[in-house]
Amino acid sequence: MSPDGRPAGGDRWTQAPQFLRAEQTRGPLPADTDVVIVGGGLAGTALAYNLAGEGIEVLLLERSELNREASGTNAGSFHFQIAIHQFTERDASGSHDRLLREVRLLLEAARLWDALEDELDANLGIHRTGGLMVAETPEELQLLHDKQSIEAEAGLETLVLEGDELRRFAPYLAPDLPGATYCPVEGHANPFLAGPTFALRAVERGAVVRTGVEVTAIDPGFVVRTSAGEVRARRVVNAAGAWAGELAALSGIVLPIRAEGLHVNVTEPRKKVLEPLVQHIGRRLTLKQAASGTFIIGGGWPSRAEAPPARYSTIWESAAGNAAVAVRVMPSLADVRVVRMWTGVWAATDDLQPVLGESVALPGYFVCMAPTGFTLGPLVARRLAANIARGVPLPDEYAPDRKGVPWIERM
């Protein structure tokens, strides 16, 4: 073993994943700490890792288990191309500049993901398979051309393929699709590995992680009351993702964040035929084939909210509708059986921007959330850590109490 407890030598691609042992996440809370992070998903664990690396004392609290909610129930896709929900207001004032900023942020996230396996000395299941975004109508094809010009200006490599060129490149797609945009840097990582690996490395750097601890109140002066006792902190970070609004309400705060359920289908395995991630410019679809041969079909179809502590539940209309779009795009899936499905949840904002930084109205209270949470999670965590530790500024448009957002109800 190396001095820090990691395996000496060996191949990270064949070694079994390393996670925190249960006893490492149990135990009493410290009486006080510098930073309390609430939320044990990808953003929270990555933030704990980065803050500990800055030499800051940090305690991460998770009410359930690490990576059990949104961060561990998504499909793990990297989304770098402009999507339809970003592009529908392309003619609005300022939309061009906003899209440029968003694509450049995603490119920065891509570069970070490229370096993470070496930095964390772990296999995160990162695969750069490339990504196809398909069009089904002439109008959607024009959208592909429109967005490609913005992506090129931002520095993202994409290429619009049409007709026979598309059929040669992707013969598995429906032959009547008029075109698709190919992005070579898209792909995916394993959502079951990324967050837990950040948590492990955070503890190795000195962070304290406690699971099964629910925050019940945050009193003035940042006395954080929990189901396991209380801890006093100098600063608090809300990294609760889709539940960030509920957590903020404990402090009388309204955040511009809402939770939306999503649905994922998984099929029986078939011979490997699909390499790139496939998306649709006009309909909800993400489609990829795992190394095992199974197809993972998602795209944000809704699931049904249930009263806590129950999870979101599946909806037949979402399962069937999502599968139908997949078969429309890739007809050979018609006789492939769906063998399981699950639900997740994601955090959304009306302006599509991250909520990142410190409240002006409540100094010491920070928020760490990005709508494209899996793709952007490690990056927004790194940026916030630099802001907390060294005062590196964050964009004003990410501020929790940015203009037009009702934030503080009472103080």
Image (spheres, rainbow, N blue to C red):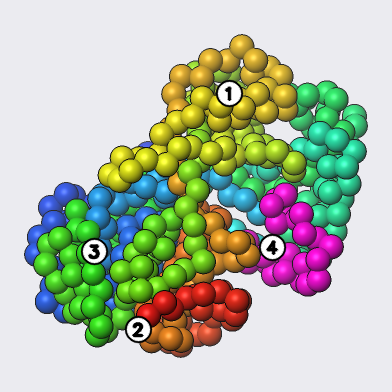
Amino acid found under the numbered disc labelled 2: Met
The reply to whether the C-beta atoms of the residues labelled 4 and 2 are less than 8 Å apart is no
- For the C terminus, the image quarter is bottom left
Report, in whole angstroms, how far the alpha carbon at label 4 lies from the one at label 2. 37 Å
- Sequence-earlier tag: 1 or 2: 1
- Sequence-earlier tag: 1 or 4: 4
* Residue 342 shows up from this direction: yes
- Sequence-earlier tag: 4 or 2: 4
- Sequence-earlier tag: 3 or 4: 4
Q: How crowded is mark 4: few (under 14 residues within 10 Å), some or many (20 or more)?
A: many
Horizontal side of residue 158 vs 341, given as left or right? right
* Residue 117 shows up from this direction: no
Report, in whole angstroms, how far the alpha carbon at label 1 lies from the one at label 2. 47 Å
Report, in whole angstroms, how far the alpha carbon at label 3 lies from the one at label 1. 38 Å
**Residue underneath mark 1:** 320
Name which quarter of the figure residue 102 lies in.
bottom right
The reply to whether the C-beta atoms of the residues labelled 3 and 2 are less than 8 Å apart is no
Q: Residues within 10 Å of mark 1 (few under 14, many from 20)?
A: few
Check residue 103 in the rendering and tell me which mark sits there, or answer none.
4
Where in the figure is residue 6, as x and y percent of width and height? 26, 56
Mark 1 vs mark 4, foreground winner is: 1
Which residue is drawn at the image coordinates 61% and 34% (left, top)? 287
**Residue underneath mark 3:** 215
Judging depth in this view, the residue of 71 and 366 nearest the camera is 366
**Residue underneath mark 2:** 411
Mark 1 vs mark 2, foreground winner is: 2
- Sequence-earlier tag: 3 or 2: 3
